[in-house]
Amino acid sequence: MDTGKTPVGEKHKGIFLVGSAGLAGTAILAKEKREDLLTRFRPGFTDRAAEEAKLLPGKDACRILEKAGARAVEACGAGGVFAGLWRLAEALKTGMEADLRRIPVRQETVEICEFFGLNLYQLFSGGCFLAAAAHTEDFISFLEAEGLQPVLIGRTAEGNDRILRNRENIRYLTKPAPDELYRVFPERAEELFRIWENTQEA
């Protein structure tokens, strides 16, 4: 578990991610587009990708994060981690910085997104949560005791800029774009979101 070393003072909060970016969308793609994926990947790879969403936190993750002391919690869902980061910053009325290299991503997500030409950070991330909280041992320990693995991916900041870092490269987070699943399933994306959410509540 990577808690990072980003300094967080009393005023600014750490931004933590629980879950894995785009994993729910990856599972949907692996199930719905299995035959297409088999033109490049072995069946075992595709089947594993379809099942890995089971590794995501349960629906109680939001409640647990709040109980641990998070100042704000945001479910990523449609639009992926980028949309979640935008909504979190909007809720806090603050700027933020996030390091893309710290965002947890499964290799299956990377490869399937490359296959379809998708941005994994804008891919459906149901079961993935962002939280703004003081970076303390008590916060981390509480979550780990509840079975969650928080990863520090950034911090809130002065001003309105929402900065995304990738080594020396810097870009600015913009208003959420449509989820990448709309590019693959223009007519069915919303239905697929609902099906996924229903399976989590079952």
Image: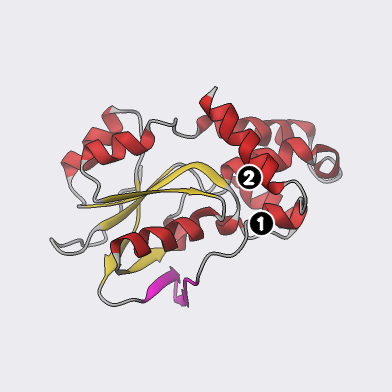
Direction from residue 8 to residue 44 in the image, left or right: right
The x and y percentages for residue 189 are 70, 48
- Please report the bounds of the magenta region as a residue range: 161-174
The main secondary structure of the magenta stretch is strand
Of callouts 2 and 1, which one flags the residue occurring earlier in the amino acid sequence?
2
The image's colouring method is secondary structure
Q: Quadrant of the N terminus?
A: top left
Q: Which class describes the residues within 10 Å of circle 2: few (<14), some (14-19), or many (20+)?
A: many
* Residue beneath the point at 21% across and 51% down: 135
Q: Quadrant of the C terminus?
A: top right
**Looking at the image, residue 21 lies above or below residue 83:** above
* Residue beneath the point at 33% across and 60% down: 91
The x and y percentages for residue 23 are 58, 43
The type of residue carrying mark 1 is Glu
Residue carrying label 2: 25
The x and y percentages for residue 26 are 65, 43
Residue carrying label 1: 180
| Secondary structure beneath label 2 | helix
Instruction: Out of 95 and 23, give the one closest to the viewer.
Output: 95
The x and y percentages for residue 140 are 24, 40
- Within the image, what quadrant is residue 115 found in? bottom right
Task: In the displayed orientation, state which residue is furthest to the top.
Answer: 202
**Looking at the image, residue 145 lies above or below residue 95:** above
Instruction: Out of 127 and 141, give the one closest to the viewer.
Output: 127
